[in-house]
Image (cartoon, grey):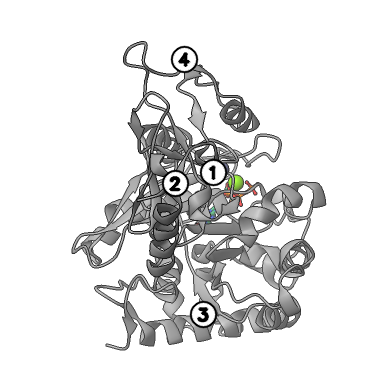
Amino acid sequence: MGLFSRKKRAVEQSKKEKNFDIVCLYCFKNFPQDKVMFRALEPLDEDGYRAQNDKLLDAYREKFHMDSLGELPVVLDPAEFNEVSKSYHRGILSSLKDAYDNVTTKRVCPFCHNDLPRSAGFAPSTIISFVGASQVGKSVFLTSLIHTLKTVTPRNFQIFCTPINNEMSRKFKYAYEDPLIENGQLLDPTQKEKQQEPFIFTFSFADGSKPEINIAFFDVAGEGIIDNEYMDIYAAHIRNSSGVLFLVDPLQFKSVGRKIMLKNGLDYDNTFSEEPVDVLSSLVEDYIYKQSNGVSNIPTAVVLTKTDLLEALRHDGEYIRPNGNMFSHFIHKGFFDLSEFENINGEVDEFIEQIDPNFRNAMKRRFSQLGFFAVSALGAHPDVIRQRVSSFAPLRVDEPFLWLLYKLGYIEGRKP
Ligand SMILES: Nc1nc2c(ncn2[C@@H]2O[C@H](COP(=O)(O)OP(=O)(O)OP(=O)(O)O)[C@@H](O)[C@H]2O)c(=O)[nH]1
Ligand SMILES: [Mg+2]
Ligand SMILES: [Zn+2]
């Protein structure tokens, strides 16, 4: 068979099979599955390419303050090879025979040369982003959420959550999990100069009913949220997100912040420079604005953090129902319980409407798929002076994430 008919067949084949554009979970660039590149095999003998420093990968790593990986086998661009050198699996370009007749299956991102996960192209690339002003609790929530997804959620859903590689596993443990959970130490504010590399986890379904998904969690520095330059870097990431966790801290709202602190016997020091509505307008300028008609259809969970501090308002009956669901734990098991969702969603929506109707209405206008949630990532107020966490008892932390999985079609949602 001639080269052209072979190529035509491959193209026709790939049209027939369902494939997905790839969003690189490291640099957030979006590209068609057949634009991947390949890393050559380790040179086993003289029949191979010489290893060399990978400039693109080193540049990516430097941006995140990581060391160069030194000499690596070269990256090959399939565009420079004949169609006969390429192989397709279920219509997806998945291996390349190099000039020395070695076949590599190691796909890398054409923009940053990081490895692509096995599922790239076969299943949607899923990015979940955190958004929120400084000090609302993004880093603590991320730690508590991932810890819960690894240790508790698998008891209720047949989903297993593992870091995508050893480097990621070590980084999460060293920078987040050990300090906060093992040593009870609060985390330093996330610095915008020290850009955070995304944390990538693989979710696999025990019964094999769904392809595994890779989810990149991206911990932004709150101080950068209203900084246009910083947001420019991250706009690509937010724009390519499949789901957004929009964190709001009850202390952030001028109307109740002081009251909450006083009721808890704490000094009120308004460290928040921006209110939720400011964060929203920054987002609107940077990313929603660029979507058609200014409305985003990305499922967005508004997550009220630090609900342990709201207990003190509970019996006033002013803002919160004394029998509020937000203070009791609820376990979604086997499916996402939509009755429970209606309760918590209504309750938090009502609370936010009372304390900041502008913000609430703007959110409703800008996001067509919105859910309201309430969590306490720690379960109790930490000792802020000594920067110590007294107890670690997360409340409802995985609920907004499970709702996103339900909205994205990965888990079932229904009434009991
Ligand atoms: N009461 C209570 N306080 C919390 C909780 N989670 C976080 N905090 C407090 O909020 C502070 C900020 O939390 P971080 O997770 O570091 O906040 P962040 O949003 O990552 O902040 P930046 O990185 O500066 O944007 C912590 O140091 C704690 O004092 C919680 O569940 N309950
Ligand atoms: Mg942080
Ligand atoms: Zn990339």
Q: Are marks 4 and 2 in contact (CB under 8 Å)?
A: no
| Residue under the point 31% across and 88% down | 415
| Residue under the point 53% across and 78% down | 371
Q: Amino acid at mark 2?
A: Ile
Task: In the rendered structure, find residue 200 and report the number of the disc placed on it.
Answer: 2
Q: Amino acid at mark 4?
A: Arg
Q: Amino acid at mark 1?
A: Tyr
Give how far apart the Cα atoms at labels 1 and 4 are. 26 Å
Give how far apart the Cα atoms at labels 3 and 2 are. 41 Å
**SS class of the residue under badge 1?**
loop
Give how far apart the Cα atoms at labels 2 and 1 are. 8 Å
| 1 or 4: mark nearer the eye | 4
**SS class of the residue under badge 2?**
strand
Q: What residue would you read off at disc 1? A: 26
Tell which circle, 3 or 2, labels the residue nearer the N-terminal end. 2
Is 228 placed left or right of 74 in the picture?
A: right
Q: Are marks 2 and 1 in contact (CB under 8 Å)?
A: yes
Tell which circle, 1 or 3, labels the residue nearer the N-terminal end. 1
Is 241 placed left or right of 4 in the picture?
A: right
Q: What residue would you read off at disc 4? A: 50
Seen in the picture, residue 204 relative to 139 is either above or below; the reply is below
Give how far apart the Cα atoms at labels 3 and 4 are. 71 Å
Q: Position of residue 177 (x, y in %)?
A: 41, 40
Give how far apart the Cα atoms at labels 1 and 3 are. 46 Å
Q: Position of residue 401 (x, y in %)?
A: 43, 65
| 4 or 2: mark nearer the eye | 4
Task: In the rendered structure, find residue 282 and report the number of the disc placed on it.
Answer: none
Q: Are marks 1 and 4 in contact (CB under 8 Å)?
A: no
**SS class of the residue under badge 4?**
loop
